[in-house]
Image: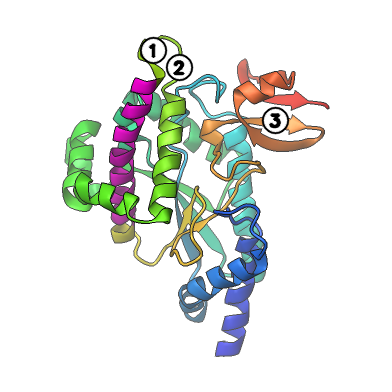
Amino acid sequence: MNRNDAVAIATKILKEIMVYRRRLNHHAEHGDEEDNEVINVQLPRFLKLVERGDPVQFVRPAFPTKSPNSAKVLGILPDMAERLSLKFLEMFCQRIQQIYSPGAHIRICSDGHVFSDLISVDDDVVDKYQKSIEDMVASIGATHLSTYSLRDVSDFSLHGRDYNAQRKLLVKHYAKPEYEIKTELTSDEKGLHLYRNITRFLYEDSLFPGREESKTTLRKDAKRRAVSVVQRSWAWGNLLNAQFPSAIRLSIHPQPTDSIKIGIHMLPTKDDWLTPWHGVAANLNGNFVLMKNAEAQRLNGELVMVQGAPSHYVINT
């Protein structure tokens, strides 16, 4: 393949990805310019894969566990929100294969055990969620998706399912000290944006029944935990970079245009930070969208059960 053809194919792949990109500024006036900036950053990496004739390998830290807040989700297990998202990721790879015959593969790198102790979710609950995700990948007949989690890291395998020990090893070998993380987060607008949104998630997730602390106390605690969550999240990213050095990183969050990570949506949502494990799937006038459980209830959504478990809502307005 000559270089011009390789550039054309790599550019087509990136333009397909841009259709689903999560944006830091949803109302940006220059969306095309932003997309072109992302393409310019990413093109050399995709071009190298295309010139070698290699499949595009993606890693996507995602599908950790359901939020513990029932105002956001239907329960502890994956539901229609996850099923539709996995189907999208499979379709996403199929679309790339239509452009580039070697195709693409997404390794879903579940980070639930990475910070479960920081989000008030038991490791046993994370295990159940991850097993259900694996079963769901199989049930939809996905051939372009696979899963990877903390227990699959060979260097940590001696600890079996002792996730506390595995988390300590992750931080020891792949993390920066928390004080450095906090300095990075508070030194520029990008870091502050991430810090505030992670803090918001943690605060919302702490508002579940039985909590006796004041909202002020919970907010302070969320700010403290946010630094630790980011520390471990970045450590997980560093581990994945070491394990899969040629993989392209897909993110669940919006990313700056100059980032090596690309944030993409899996389901339509008004909130660029909302994910399937922090929300529910709602069939709104015939189209599925992602929203919080409380919002679906406020809109008088009809809850649909599948095999005895809550699945999604139907909303007609």
Q: Quadrant of residue 212?
A: top left
Q: Which residues are magenta?
A: 216-240
The numbered disc on residue 17 is none
Q: Is residue 203 left or right of residue 135?
A: left
Q: Position of residue 306 (x, y in %)?
A: 66, 21
Label 3 Cα crowd, 10 Å radius (few <14 / some 14-19 / many 20+): many
Q: Position of residue 35 (x, y in %)?
A: 60, 67
| Residue 46 visible within the image | no
The numbered disc on residue 208 is 2
Disc 2, SS: loop
Q: Amino acid at mark 3?
A: Ala
Q: Amino acid at mark 1?
A: Arg
Q: Position of residue 209 (x, y in %)?
A: 45, 11
The residue that appears at 49% across and 73% down in the rendered structure is 41
Q: Earlier in the sequence, mark 2 or mark 3?
A: 2
The numbered disc on residue 282 is 3
Magenta stretch encompasses residue 144: no
User: Does residue 141 lie above or below 163 as drawn?
Assistant: below
Figure label count: 3
Q: Quadrant of residue 65?
A: top left
Label 1 Cα crowd, 10 Å radius (few <14 / some 14-19 / many 20+): few
The residue that appears at 60% across and 41% down in the rendered structure is 271
Query: Which quadrant: the C terminus?
Result: top right
Magenta stretch encompasses residue 236: yes
Q: Main secondary structure of the magenta part?
A: helix
Q: CA distance from mark 1 to mark 3?
A: 28 Å
The one of 153 and 206 positioned closer to us in this rendering: 206
Disc 1, SS: loop
User: Does residue 209 lie above or below 83 as drawn?
Assistant: above
The residue where tag 1 is placed is 211
Q: Are marks 2 and 1 in contact (CB under 8 Å)?
A: yes
